[in-house]
Image: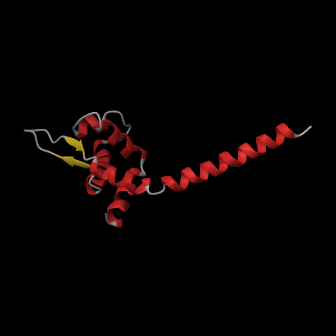
Amino acid sequence: MSVDVLDATFAALADPTRRAILARLAEGEATVTELAAPFAMSQPAVSKHLRVLEHAGLISRGRDAQRRPCRLEAARLKNAMDWLADYRGYWEESYQRLDDLLGELDAGQEEAP
C-alpha cells in the first residue's frame, strides 16, 4: 500500500466530525442531509467533510433515483489497521517490560522490613 493512501486515510481520520460520519455510515448508508442532522454546521460544510472522506477512499456515493446515498468503504480502514498492527509487537513488548519492572518493585517492597 502506498504512503499516499495511508496519508489520505489518516488525514481524513484526524477530524472528529469525519470520524463521527464514518461511525454513522457503519450503521448503513445515509444521505448528506441525514449525515448533517446531528452536527451544528451547514450542509455544505458536511459536504466538504464528505469530499475528504471520499478522496481518501473511506466512503463512496451512489445514485438511487433522487438520492445520493453515502456508504462506508471499510477496505481503506482495514489497510490502516494492518499498518498499525505492525507496531503491536513493539507495544506488547514494552508493556511486558513494564509489567516485569512493576512486579520486581512490588516484590522488593514485600521483602523490605
Front residue of 81 and 41: 81
Q: Which one is nearer the viewer's eye here, 94 or 77?
A: 94
Residue at horizontal 32%, vertical 66%? 2
Tell me what residue is drawn at x 29 percent, y 56 percent: 56
Could you tell me which quadrant the N terminus lies in?
bottom left
Task: Name the residue rendered at 32%, 36% in the picture.
Answer: 24
Is residue 39 rendered to the left or right of residue 28?
right
Residue 7 at x, y percent in the picture: 37, 62
Q: State the residue lying farthest toward the right.
A: 113
The relative height of residue 111 versus residue 9 in the rendered view (above or below) is above
- Residue 69: give x, y in percent of width and height: 18, 40
- The answer to which of 57 and 36 lies nearer the viewer is 57
Count of residue discs: 0
Q: Position of residue 40 (x, y in %)?
A: 38, 37
Quick check: 81 above or below 40? below
The x, y position of residue 105, in whole percent, is 77, 45
In the orientation shown, which residue stands out farthest toward the front? 111
The answer to which quarter of the image holds residue 62 is: top left
Residue positioned 33% across, 54% down in the render: 79
Quadrant where the image shows the C terminus: top right
